[in-house]
């Protein structure tokens, strides 16, 4: 070796580690087969094998090091100071509301429900502005359900209704529904017939066998038309003008549905948040129930968006008996969407404090709701500086679940999945922050009841 070569700086390979079978918490698919390559010298994820484009954006853009632990009215403070102020705000409020919960662990969600119970507030999740109508429909119609594993291994007929999985859930087609080879569909895509129902032709339309372009605000009429045709009821031809689809096309589709061995209706917010709302969901759930009378198996499942919004519904349900919009002010749970849902509470100016966890209502609520939220003291937990964190009285910077912290999340089919974090964060987890706030609230309440 020459003298120049000996004195030249040596390139040191980074300290790489592979985290196998990590879980992506970006969307409701909660894919748990991701292999993450972590550069330990920088605590950064450099590769996310098998992750979709959305999953890669999630893994590569959630390394936060430049934010204070917490702020009070925009002033950087320590966690301890922020814990005290947050507890004071929540414990002294007359009508506090807890909102969000869809992008954190079930363990943190349980503590959030407990805090809301201690302070006699209202607990609500992002379900109230997405699949809330489905939660209401489940109570009146029920749900014929299954896991995504059953869809993969059995479904030979798929209906995607009011959603665009090709862009919103990129791996759903390839991992769970349309493309994968299964035990009873060994040829994968060739063994399946797929239908997309939507008001416009999206990228998902290219992947299916039949695209039904329903007229806007006519999903309810389409679902009931399919139910009627399945039962052999004569349908007035004028319905074609309402829904924009020929009856002949629907009759052929119903015949195929009856001949299927295992069918699945996977519906999104294009169905639940349009005219009809919970009535639309009821109609689709009833359609799946009806189809089970013809000697085959049919299920209906909502396509959930956020990584653990299904977990939020489960945790709030097993804690209170209801999935979202639950008031605990009287010492027992009361459920009434429109009265106890967050956007309505804020629009009417009723809430006087808010605990916002892993959500950003200031970026998507109505203008009246945002205006009232900006006028009341708000406690925010978020890894990044969201629009809501900017107006918060107390804002906590927290570690990102799944990347920095372990825990449990629920896939969109209600299957619990454990998290395998890639590296630790300098910030506390949502669970740790909420637990500290809960302890201070309880101490305040205990002190106030002790005799002088």
Image: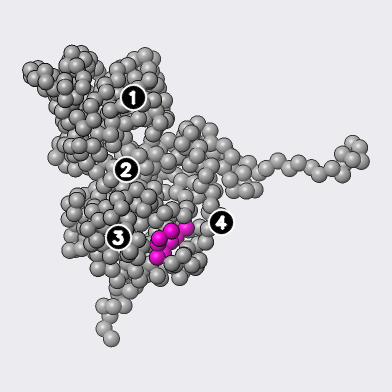
The tag on residue 310 is: 2
Q: Along the polypeptide, which appears first: circle 3 or circle 2? A: 2
Q: Position of residue 432 (x, y in %)?
A: 43, 59
Total numbered badges shown on the rendered structure: 4
In the rendered image, which residue does mark 1 sit on?
201
Nearer-N-terminus badge (4/1): 4
Q: Which residues are magenta?
A: 390-397
Calculate the distance from the C-alpha at mark 1 to the C-alpha at mark 2. 28 Å
Q: Which residue is mark 3?
A: 372
Q: CA distance from mark 3 to mark 2?
A: 28 Å
- Foreground mark, 1 or 2? 1
Where's residue 327, x and y in %? Answer: 21, 58
Helix or strand or loop: what does disc 2 sit on? Answer: helix
CB-based contact (under 8 Å), mark 3 and mark 2: no
The front one of 182 and 348 is: 348
Q: CA distance from mark 4 to mark 1?
A: 42 Å
Q: Write down the quadrant of residue 331 in the picture.
A: bottom left
Which comes before the other along the chain, label 1 or label 3?
Answer: 1
Classify residue 166 by image quadrant. Answer: top left
Q: Residue at x 25, y 56 (%)?
A: 347
User: Residue 66: which numbered mark, if any?
Assistant: 4
- Going from N to C along the chain, the mark reached first, 1 or 2, is 1
Residue 352 in sight here: yes
């Amino acid at each position: 070796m020459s003298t120049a070569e000996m004195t030249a700086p040596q390139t040191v390979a980074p300290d790489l580690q592979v985290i196998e079978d990590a879980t992506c918490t970006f969307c409701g698919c909660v894919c748990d087969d991701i292999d993450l390559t972590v550069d330990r010298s920088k605590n950064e994820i450099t590769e996310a094998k098998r992750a979709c484009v959305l999953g890669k954006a999630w893994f590569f853009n959630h390394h936060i090091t430049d934010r204070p632990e917490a702020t009070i009215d925009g002033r950087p403070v320590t966690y301890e100071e922020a814990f005290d102020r947050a507890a004071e705000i929540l414990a002294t409020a007359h009508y506090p509301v807890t909102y969000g919960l869809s992008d954190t662990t079930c363990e943190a969600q349980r503590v959030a429900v407990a805090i809301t119970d201690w302070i006699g507030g209202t607990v609500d999740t992002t379900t109230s502005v997405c699949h809330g109508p489905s939660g209401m429909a489940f109570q009146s119609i029920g749900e014929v359900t299954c896991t995504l594993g059953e869809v993969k291994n059995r479904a030979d007929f798929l209906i995607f209704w009011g959603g665009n999985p090709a862009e919103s859930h990129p791996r759903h087609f390839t991992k769970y529904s349309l493309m994968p080879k299964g035990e009873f569909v060994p040829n994968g895509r060739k063994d399946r017939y797929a239908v997309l129902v939507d008001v416009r032709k999206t990228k998902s339309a290219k992947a299916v066998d039949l695209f039904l372009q329903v007229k806007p605000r006519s999903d309810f009429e389409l679902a009931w038309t399919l139910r009627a045709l399945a039962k052999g009821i004569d349908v007035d031809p004028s319905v074609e003008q309402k829904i924009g689809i020929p009856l002949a096309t629907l009759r052929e589709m119903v015949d195929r549905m009856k001949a299927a061995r295992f069918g699945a209706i996977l519906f999104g917010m294009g169905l639940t948040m349009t005219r009809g709302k919970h009535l639309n969901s009821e109609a689709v759930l009833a359609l799946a129930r009806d189809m089970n009378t013809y000697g085959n198996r049919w299920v209906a499942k909502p396509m959930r968006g956020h990584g653990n919004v299904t977990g939020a519904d489960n945790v709030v349900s097993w804690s209170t008996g209801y999935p979202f919009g639950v008031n605990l002010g009287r010492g027992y749970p009361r459920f009434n969407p429109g009265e106890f849902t967050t956007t309505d509470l804020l629009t009417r100016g009723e809430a006087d404090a808010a605990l916002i966890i892993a959500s950003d209502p200031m970026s998507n609520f109505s203008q009246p709701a945002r205006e009232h939220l900006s006028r009341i003291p708000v406690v925010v937990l978020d890894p990044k500086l969201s629009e809501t964190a900017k107006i918060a009285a107390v804002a906590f910077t927290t570690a990102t679940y799944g990347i920095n912290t372990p825990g449990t999340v629920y896939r969109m089919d209600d299957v619990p999945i454990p998290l395998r974090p890639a590296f630790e964060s300098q910030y506390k987890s949502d669970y740790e922050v909420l637990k500290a706030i809960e302890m201070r609230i309880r101490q305040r309440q205990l002190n106030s009841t002790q005799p002088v």
